[in-house]
Image (cartoon, grey):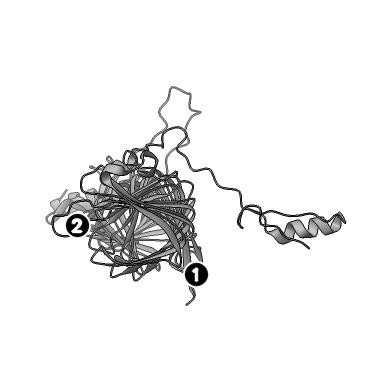
Amino acid sequence: MSKRTVFFLSAICVFCLAFAVVPQKKKRKTRTQKTEDNRVYLVHSDVLSYDQYKNPDAQILNGHVQFRHNGAKLFCDSAHFYEASNSFEAFGHVKMYQGDTLSLFSDYAYYDGNDQMAQARFNVVLNHRKSKLFTDSLNFDRLYNIGYFFEGGKLVDNGSVLTSDWGEYDTKTRMAVFNYDVRLRNKKFYLTSDTLYYDTGKSLAHVVGPSNITSGNSHIYTENAYYNTKSEYSELYGRSVMKDNGKTVVGDSVYYDSKKKTAEAFGNAVFTDSINKNKLTGDYCFYDENTGYALATKRAVAIDFSQKDSLYMHADTFKIFTFNINTDSVYRKIHAYNHVRAYRIDVQAVCDSLVYNSKDSCMTMYHDPIVWNVNQQLLGEEIQVFMKDSTVNRAHVIGQALSVEQLRDSVHFNQISSKEMFAFFLNGEIHEAEAKDNVQIVYYPIDDSDSTIIGLNYTETTQMKMFLENRKMKKIWMPKAEGTLYPLSQVPPDKYFLPKYAWFDYIRPLDKDDIFNWRPKKGGAELKPEKRREAPLQHLKAAEQDSTATTLQTNVLTPSTPLTP
């Protein structure tokens, strides 16, 4: 036979073998028999040709080419089929379908049936359920159901668009991993990161490394966080920082619900309001943006840095309540309890509980409140401090008021006691003070020439006003008073101290770290609220009801002063 005849018969044999894809009827398989068939089958081609010189190992297929392999169907416009190596190259409108949930489209692909690896190139689209992956270079490992892209890719899932330089997608677990210049965007937020793990089934993103999440005016910086794109719930770890409209939340772990607008922070939590210049810290903090409610506990500290020197206040628990939120008449109430201790360089305070109302800028201290300023101590049953432009404007001491000033020798003390006291401030310094009802005074006049103590002045009156300048007394006013000036050598022992005198220097906070060290008063030194005396009219009404004429006596008047109906 001629060479041409031999070549023609060889081509016919190859053509017949290529289309001999229907296997013979197989016998019933046993459990020990292998059931996997790794052969790539050519299902259809309009035209099949063979070029021994250009590509002797390939069958050249054109027109409606279709392959099948282990449950997958592959379509293309043309292909080179390498039957010996169980592989093929596909050109033009390449499509691969695996079941009814996975499809892969590209302009070109190389498929290796032995490794079950598809290398798709140019305009690649991987569809899996509701997720779409777009790239120009994708390797899809059918053995492990993982797709890899390495020249930039974009994943679209439930309204979220995720892009990166490199990534992989597991169609079995629906988990995607993205690296280098990662960007995740949807209608409500924008995320950038170095590494991101994204569970498309749960719509859960996990960022690792320096990452930023922006949503409107809100911004989150984290290096380890989880974010659910459906529920909009964030879990931030590793001292992540969350900012929103001048407010910042930091913690070892922070949990933020974007739909409910609530945030929880654990471990060295810090809540900062840069607009109002205050800070709330604790091992646990909670904040609700809708209601303006905030809570801090476990070594909780409130810090006001609106002044030159910051004020540090510790309590077991802080609570902030906001009223008329999102209106022009908004105001807040801050509750601090128990074991309240406050420190600032110029003022310190201790009490059991405290309430601050921004509506009238009033801070009220309850249960054995004590306030210190340099060498002065002020205490009573209740102390109200009114602020103006973040500075003290006036103070009101209610019930068993006592003011004590320690002199330079640390031995003698100026003292004033009364039922209530008022103090008025100018530019942060006291310029006027007033004591009302049952006023008792122990005062040591000072010789201006040599700053020595002249003696002790003991006075009793119903009302007293003091006017000061540069913290020095300039004038005293009393309506009527009874007093005695004793030389120091002739002071009676019972006149050195008023009956209600107390000096609680052992309780006073020493610095901003000492606010955590609660030191109670010594036994028996606690104030016992005085029972309010009844007005005479109440006794008169009671007497009238009994139809009995009685002579009444009241402690408000001079003893034995009679009143008749």
Q: Could you tell me which residue is drawn at 70 percent across and 59 percent down?
A: 536
Query: Mark 2 touching mark 1, by CB under 8 A?
Result: no
Farthest residue to the top: give it: 32
Badge 2 marks a residue whose secondary structure is loop
Between 109 and 434, which is closer to the camera in this rendering?
Answer: 434
Q: Could you tell me which residue is drawn at 30 percent across and 43 percent down?
A: 490
Farthest residue to the left: give it: 53
* Place of residue 138 in the rendered image (x, y in percent of width and height, measured from the top left): 26, 54
Q: CA separation, marks 2 and 1? A: 57 Å
* Place of residue 541 in the rendered image (x, y in percent of width and height, measured from the top left): 79, 60
Among the 4 quarters of the image, the one containing residue 535: bottom right
Q: Is residue 99 left or right of residue 551?
A: left
- Nearer the observer: mark 2 or 1; the answer is 2
Q: Could you tell me which residue is drawn at 18 percent across and 51 percent down?
A: 452
- Residue 97 seen in render: no
Between 166 and 308, which is closer to the camera in this rendering?
Answer: 308
Mark 2 crowdedness (10 Å alpha carbons): few <14, some 14-19, many ≥20? few
Question: Mark 1 or mark 2, which is nearer the start of the sequence?
Answer: 1
Residue tagged 2? 447
Between 375 and 304, which is closer to the camera in this rendering?
Answer: 375
Residue tagged 1? 325
Badge 1 marks a residue whose secondary structure is loop
Q: Could you tell me which residue is drawn at 42 percent across and 25 percent down?
A: 33
Q: Is residue 22 above or below residue 125?
A: above
Q: Is residue 382 above or below residue 513?
A: below
Q: Amino acid at mark 2?
A: Asp
* Place of residue 432 in the rendered image (x, y in percent of width and height, measured from the top left): 35, 67
Q: Amino acid at mark 1?
A: Ile
Q: Is residue 175 left or right of residue 546?
A: left
**Quarter that holds the C terminus:** bottom right
Farthest residue to the bottom: give it: 328
Mark 1 crowdedness (10 Å alpha carbons): few <14, some 14-19, many ≥20? some
